[in-house]
C-alpha cells in the first residue's frame, strides 16, 4: 500500500516522479504528492487529494516545479483520512528533513509524545510526519550525518517502512530506509532512482539493487551506496529485471485487468515452461527433488485473498493426486495462532507481490519454528522470495490491476506442477497418467484462448446483472474453490455483495437469503458431484433464484435447470479451475464496466497489502 519514488540526476525531477507514480498508482490512490529541490537546496512540495491526475494538473504535468532531485508518493490512507494535509511528502518543523513513507509506524503515538515534549509540532494525523520529525530530531541531537540520524530513528521505530528522505544540507541526495516494505534502487547514466516496485523505473534501468531490512541507501551522483544499522558501508549485487517496460503498459486494452486476463495463456505457458523438460516436469530448479518430495509428510499452504483461493484448489488437487495431507490457512490467522507444524511438513507461501505483510509474517513464523518453506511468488527479489528456503517464480510478468487474474492463473499452474510431480515421485500415479496430466497442462493456454475468443454472451449477462444487490457463487470440491475466486472478483470490482458457498452448506443457514431474483452462480466442472450440485441449484431455484450455470461442454442437460449457461472446454478435472475462472473474471469485469466503475483501481483497495 502506498507507492514511493525518488530521483536525482541531471533532468527535471518532477515529470520523472509523476511518471513513476503513474506506474505505482495501483498501490494507493487517495492522494499524492511530490517534493522537488532546486540547485539552491530550496524544497517545493505540491500535494493533491484524489487520483494522481489531480496532482499532475496542479503541477502542470510537473513543469511547475524546477529541480533535479525529488521524491514522490501515492497514498493509501492508514493513519489519517485521505486529505491534502495528510498526503505525503511530510516536512520537519523547520524544513530540514522531508520524507515519503510506505508502511505503518506502530509506536507512532509514543514517538509523537516524545517529539512534542522536545518542542515539535504536528500538522497532520499521519505516522509519517512522526518518522520525518524523529529523523530530524536525531540529526540535530547528534550532529551527525543523515545516515546516523536515520539509523537512530530506525532503532526507535517499530513497524514497517520504505522511506525516501531528503535533507536540506545535502542537495542532490536522496536517502532510503527500509524495513518489511518493498523498495528497489537503481542507477544508470549518472542518475539514480528508487521506487516501491520495478515498474516505476523500468523505463530508465533494468539493473537494480534490493535494499534489505534495516538498511539505508544513499543516492548521489549516479551511484547508490548502502549502509547497515551500524552505519558501515555494505556491498550489494545488482539484479537484472527481466520484465520489459511494455509489459507494464496497457497495450491497447482499455484496462489493465482485461489485458492481464488475455495474458493468462502466456503466463501459464511461461510458468509451466520454467519446469517442463520434454514431457516431464523437473522441480529440482525450484528446490524440490523427487527425494525431497517423497520426504514431505504434510503440506501447510499459507496465503491471503486470491492466493489463498489457489491454496484451496491445491488442497483438493494435491490430496487427490499425491495423497499427502494438505491444509490451507489464511496468513493473517496463521501468524498469530501458534500453529503446530510437523517435522517434515512443508510450508508453502503463495503470493503474487511477495510483499503481503501477513504472508511474510507467516513465512517468518514458520521459519522460526524450523519448518522448511517453499514460496510461489511472482515478483522477483521480493521479500518472501528472498526469505523462503526455495522459490518457484510464477512467470506472469507485472500485474497492475488490483484484481488479480494472470498471477492467480500462474499460481494455479505452479501448484498443479507440485501436485503432479509429487504424485509421481511418491508413486501415487502411473507413468502414463503422469504424462497425460503434464500434456493436459500444456493444453490449458489454448483452451483459455478459446474462452477468450467469444465473450459476447458474458457481456450480455453482465449488462443484465449490473443492478443486482447480492450474488451467491456455489460449488462443490474444486468448484467450491473456483467459486471463492469468482465471488471475490465480483465483489472487489463491481461492489456487488457476493458470497461463495460450498453448495452443500447452503441449507445450513444461507439459503434463507435466497429470494425472488437473487443471482446464484453455480460452478459445475466435477462430474462426480454433478447431481449433488444440481440438487442444490434446484433448491435455490424453487426459492426464486435466477440461476447461472458454468460448466463444461457436453453437460447440456444443465439447461433444463438454469436460466443461463456458459460452457468451458473439458480438461482433466483437477485443472478445471484454470478454465472456469476465466468467465468469472470476465463477468466481474463486464459488470464493473457496465456500472461505470474504475475496474483497475477499485475503492478502498490497493494491490499489495504491505500493512496488517
Ligand atoms: O500479493 P499477494 O498475492 O500476496 O496478495 C494477496 C491478496 O491481497 C490478493 O490476492 C487480493 O486478494 C487480490 N486483490 C484479489 O484480486
Image (cartoon, grey):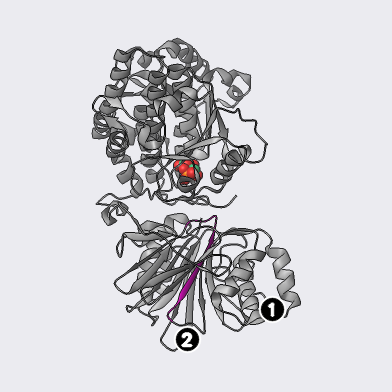
Q: Which residues are magenta?
A: 172-182
Q: What percent of the width, then of the height, locates residue 565?
A: 35, 23
Closer to the chain start, of discs 2 and 1, is: 2
**Counting other residues with Cα less than 10 Å from the Cα at mark 1, is it few (<14), some (14-19), or many (20 or more)?**
some
Question: Would you say residue 93 sits in the magenta stretch?
Answer: no
Q: Which mark is residue 298?
A: none
Give the residue at mark 2: 42
Rendered position, 268 above or below 34: above
Give the residue at mark 1: 120
Extreme residue toward the bottom, this view? 40
Extreme residue toward the right, this view? 117
Q: What percent of the width, then of the height, locates residue 80?
A: 62, 63
Q: Residue at x 66, y 40 (%)?
A: 336
Q: Secondary structure at mark 1?
A: loop
The residue nearer to you, when weighing 113 against 563, is 113
**Counting other residues with Cα less than 10 Å from the Cα at mark 2, is it few (<14), some (14-19), or many (20 or more)?**
few
Mark 2 lies within 8 Å of ligand 1 (Cβ measured): no
Residue 467 makes an appearance in the image:
no
Badge count? 2
Q: What percent of the width, then of the height, locates residue 191?
A: 34, 73
Indicate left or right for 197 with 261 as reference.
right
Distance from label 2 to label 1 (Cα)?
Answer: 22 Å
Question: Would you say residue 176 sits in the magenta stretch?
Answer: yes
The residue nearer to you, when weighing 540 against 375, is 375
Q: What percent of the width, then of the height, locates residue 386?
A: 46, 48
Q: Secondary structure at mark 2?
A: loop
Q: Quadrant of residue 101?
A: bottom right
The residue nearer to you, when weighing 191 against 258, is 191
Amino acid at each position: 500500500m502506498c507507492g514511493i519514488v525518488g530521483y536525482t540526476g541531471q533532468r527535471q525531477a518532477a515529470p520523472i516522479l509523476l511518471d513513476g507514480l503513474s506506474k505505482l498508482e495501483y498501490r494507493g490512490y487517495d492522494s499524492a504528492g511530490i517534493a522537488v529541490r532546486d540547485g539552491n537546496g530550496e524544497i517545493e512540495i505540491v500535494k493533491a487529494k484524489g487520483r494522481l491526475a489531480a496532482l499532475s494538473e496542479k503541477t502542470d504535468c510537473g513543469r511547475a516545479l524546477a529541480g533535479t532531485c525529488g521524491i514522490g508518493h501515492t497514498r493509501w490512507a492508514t493513519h489519517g483520512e485521505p486529505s491534502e494535509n495528510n498526503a505525503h511528502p511530510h516536512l520537519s518543523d523547520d524544513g530540514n528533513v522531508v520524507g515519503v513513507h510506505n508502511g505503518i509506524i506502530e509506536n507512532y503515538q509514543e514517538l509523537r509524545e516524545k517529539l512534542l515534549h522536545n518542542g515539535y509540532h504536528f500538522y497532520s494525523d499521519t505516522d509519517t510526519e512522526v518518522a520525518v520529525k524523529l529523523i530530524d530530531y536525531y540529526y540535530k541531537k547528534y550532529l551527525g550525518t543523515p545516515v546516523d540520524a536515520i539509523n537512530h530513528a530506525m532503532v526507535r521505530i517499530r513497524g514497517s517502512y520504505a522511506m525516501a528522505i531528503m535533507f536540506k544540507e545535502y542537495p542532490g541526495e536522496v536517502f532510503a530506509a527500509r524495513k518489511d516494505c518493498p523498495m528497489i534502487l537503481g542507477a544508470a547514466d549518472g542518475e539514480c532512482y528508487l521506487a516501491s516496485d520495478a515498474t516505476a523505473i523500468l523505463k530508465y534501468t533494468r539493473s537494480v539493487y534490493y535494499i534489505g531490512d534495516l538498511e539505508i541507501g544513499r543516492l548521489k551522483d549516479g551511484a547508490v551506496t548502502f549502509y547497515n544499522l551500524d552505519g558501515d558501508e555494505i556491498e550489494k549485487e545488482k539484479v537484472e529485471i527481466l520484465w520489459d517496460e511494455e509489459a507494464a503498459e496497457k497495450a491497447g486494452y482499455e484496462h489493465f485487468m482485461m489485458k492481464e486476463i488475455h495474458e493468462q495463456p502466456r503466463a501459464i505457458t511461461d510458468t509451466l515452461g520454467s519446469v517442463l523438460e520434454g514431457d516431464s516436469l523437473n522441480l529440482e530448479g525450484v528446490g524440490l527433488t523427487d527425494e525431497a518430495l517423497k520426504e514431505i509428510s504434510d503440506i501447510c499452504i499459507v496465503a491471503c485473498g486470491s492466493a489463498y483461493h489457489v491454496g484451496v484448489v491445491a488442497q483438493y488437487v494435491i490430496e487427490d493426486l499425491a495423497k499427502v495431507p494438505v491444509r490451507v490457512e489464511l496468513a493473517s490467522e496463521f501468524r498469530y495462532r501458534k500453529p503446530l507444524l510437523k517435522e517434515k511438513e512443508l510450508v508453502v507461501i503463495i503470493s503474487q507481490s511477495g510483499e503481503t505483510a501477513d504472508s511474510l509474517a507467516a513465512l517468518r513464523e514458520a521459519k522460526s519454528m524450523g519448518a522448511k518453506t517453499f514460496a510461489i511468488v511472482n515478483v522477483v527479489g521480493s521479500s518472501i522470495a528472498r526469505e523462503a528456503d526455495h522459490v518457484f517464480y510464477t512467470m506472469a510478468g507485472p500485474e497492475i490491476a488490483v484484481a488479480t487474474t494472470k498471477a492467480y492463473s500462474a499460481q494455479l499452474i505452479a501448484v498443479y506442477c507440485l501436485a503432479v510431480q509429487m504424485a509421481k515421485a511418491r508413486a501415487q500415479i502411473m507413468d502414463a497418467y503422469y504424462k497425460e496430466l503434464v500434456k493436459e497442462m500444456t493444453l490449458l493456454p489454448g483452451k483459455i484462448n478459446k474462452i477468450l475468443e467469444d465473450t459476447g454472451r458474458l457481456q450480455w449477462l453482465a449488462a443484465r446483472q449490473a443492478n443486482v444487490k447480492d450474488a451467491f457463487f456455489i460449488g462443490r470440491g474444486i468448484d467450491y474453490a473456483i467459486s471463492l475466486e469468482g465471488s471475490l472478483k465480483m465483489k472487489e470490482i463491481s461492489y456487488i455483495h457476493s458470497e461463495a458457498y460450498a453448495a452443500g452448506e447452503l441449507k445450513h443457514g444461507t439459503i434463507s437469503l435466497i429470494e425472488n431474483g437473487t443471482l446464484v452462480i453455480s460452478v459445475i466442472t466435477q462430474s462426480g458431484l454433478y447431481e449433488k450440485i444440481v440438487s442444490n441449484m434446484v433448491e435455490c431455484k424453487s426459492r426464486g433464484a435466477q440461476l447461472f450455470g458454468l460448466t463444461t461442454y457436453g453437460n447440456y442437460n444443465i439447461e433444463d435447470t438454469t436460466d443461463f449457461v456458459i460452457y468451458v472446454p473439458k480438461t482433466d478435472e483437477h485443472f478445471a479451475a484454470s478454465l472456469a475462472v476465466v468467465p468469472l473474471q470476465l463477468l466481474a469485469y463486464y459488470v464493473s464496466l457496465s456500472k461505470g466503475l474504475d475496474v483497475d483501481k477499485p475503492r478502498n483497495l490497493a494491490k499489495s497489502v504491505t500493512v496488517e
